[in-house]
Image (cartoon, rainbow, N blue to C red):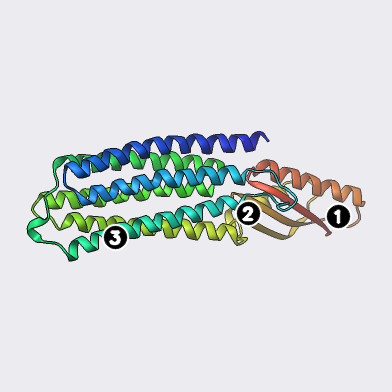
Amino acid sequence: MKQKNDYQSVAYHVSTVSIIANALLSIGKFFAGVLANSAAMISDSIHSLSDVLSTVVVMIGVKISAKEPDENHPYGHERLECVAAILLASMLAAVGAGIGMGAVNMIINRDESGLEIPGVLALVASIVSIIVKEIMYQYTAHNAKKINSPALMADAWHHRSDALSSVGALIGIGGAMLGFPILDPIASIVICIFILKAALDIFADAVRKMTDHSSGEETEAEIRKIAKSVRGVKGIDSLKTREFGAKIYVDIEISVDGKMTLNDAHAIAERVHDKIEKKLPHVKHCMVHENPA
């Protein structure tokens, strides 16, 4: 129960910080874009606003996924956090597509004399955004890895995509100020590409975690090492792992002395089970089967 409370506490704290930071950034970048006549900065402000909405989705996903197992969900609700990540990716893709379509329309229907040169305020806003969003990415990613949360990691990449889009805005605004006004809407298209790429990555990761993907060679090697360190284990006959949202399920077959009693063999299996779950907190359940060596 303590581990679950810590999980929610970290996720909610990080999400609250994200909401406040993104709301302030979105408002600041929007007014900077309007006052400095920058379409790229206005697009970037919309991206930051979408971050606020996506973080709310993350918070809802974390809360639902932490519910206790019930009659209809005997294995728990962890996969619902992946559903939240998929919803987040869909929202992100919609925002990116909207920004891209608006920028393309601006370029196609432009009147060269009507493309305004952005002001210095937009340039300053983009630099501030890059710094703040990269800090938010590092902060959120660190905590997402700490609690192994796919939804929180998706939100971290949302921050990174915003930082990269601000880089595009910076280049576009700077280029427009140097006498190439068309670079401002072109920067919006670059922002669109970064957003769509982030959405695709988030979607693919969430789907992978929902389709019983293995935990990977590194984790499985660690599990084998832990099992072999238990006294009485002669070898590992089989090992299967699968990701279940933020958690891992393990099925392992160990070989023990075939001449020992069932009670002794079972005791060894119990020690393997307990040690794996203790050493690897992300393992939700470990099933151990013993075979005669």
Give the residue at mark 1. 257
Where's residue 232, x and y in %?
81, 49
Specify the label residue 36 is tagged with: none
- Give the mark toward the camera: 1 or 3: 3
Give the residue at mark 2. 244
Q: Is residue 226 above or below residue 20?
A: below
Q: Are marks 2 and 1 in contact (CB under 8 Å)?
A: no
User: Can residue 282 be seen here?
Assistant: yes
Q: Quadrant of residue 124?
A: top left
Q: First in sequence: mark 1 or mark 3? A: 3
Which of 51 and 157 lies nearest the eye of the viewer? 51
Q: Tell me if mark 3 has few (under 14), some (14-19) or many (20+) residues whose alpha carbon lies within 10 angstroms of its own.
A: many
- Mark 1 falls on what kind of element? loop
Where's residue 191, x and y in %?
29, 55
Q: CA distance from mark 2 to mark 1?
A: 33 Å
Q: Is residue 193 above or below residue 155?
A: below
Q: Quadrant of residue 96?
A: bottom left
Which of 4 and 264 lies nearest the eye of the viewer? 4
Which of 261 and 3 lies nearest the eye of the viewer? 3
Where's residue 66, x and y in %?
62, 43
Q: Amino acid at mark 3?
A: Gly
